[in-house]
Image (cartoon, rainbow, N blue to C red):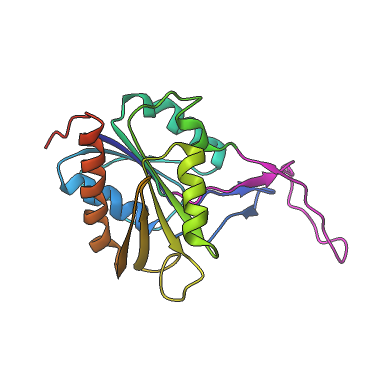
Amino acid sequence: MRVLVTAGPTREALDPVRYLTNRSSGKMGYAMADAFARAGHQVLLVSGPTVLVVPEGVDFLPVESAAEMFEAVKRHIGRMDAAVFAAAVADYRPAAVSEQKIKKTGETLTLELVRTPDILGSVRGEFGFTGTLVGFAAETENLLANARIKLERKGCDLVIANDVSKPGIGFDSDRNEVLLVFPEHVEALPEDEKHHLAPHIVREIERLAAERGRPIVL
């Protein structure tokens, strides 16, 4: 099976030395890419900036901004059987990028932000992807409800949801605790190392792909 995995944060430039970003380490996405590769699948990892080592046997495409990730996904997703969107993509970017470093001139600074392209939301419609589609939902409240909204609006087969407000899991951590939200049911995976959770999630995605009639080539 050919699988695209996105991982890590994006960086949205403000000036030559500053950017807007988030706390994603990329560890969950890299664990997913590694688990797919170990299961014998062909993996393309599209990653924002991280300090992580690229898993062995994985094709790697580094990007920085949400726009760059959008273009990379658009370019490659047509040949994929499954796609897993674990990246924490910025929802907004600065409306203008200063060519020079912004100097400290007043007590406040107002930034105008504009929406970034909706990568996951473009996959079914604009990109025409018909394979197995998996999204991640990093939430701080209403975990299941928000995950179900994402599942339905984005056309996902599965959304993996985690509460990033809980200490010790999620962002900046080697551990996670997730809900696997399917159209018809929910499965809770108890807290564990991300590299232990990833193979379980891969097996669920393999099952979903088989139900869609996609080849599981090992």
Nearer to me, 61 or 208: 208
Extent of the magenta region:
87-116
Residue displayed at 49% across by 26% down: 125
Q: Is residue 21 magenta?
A: no
* Residue positioned 38% across, 28% down in the render: 76
Expressed as whole percent of the image width and height from the top left, the position of residue 15 reads: 69, 48
Q: Position of residue 7 (x, y in %)?
A: 41, 49
- Residue 169 position, x and y percent, is 41, 70
Q: Main secondary structure of the magenta part?
A: loop
Q: Quadrant of the image for the C terminus?
A: top left
- The residue positioned farthest toward the bottom in the image shown: 167
Judged from this view, the residue extending furthest toward the left is: 218
Snapshot quadrant of residue 97: top right
Q: Nearer the viewer, residue 59 or 81?
A: 81
- 110 magenta-colored: yes
Relative side of 95 to 123, left or right: right
Q: Quadrant of residue 134?
A: top left
Quarter of the N terminus within the rendering: top left
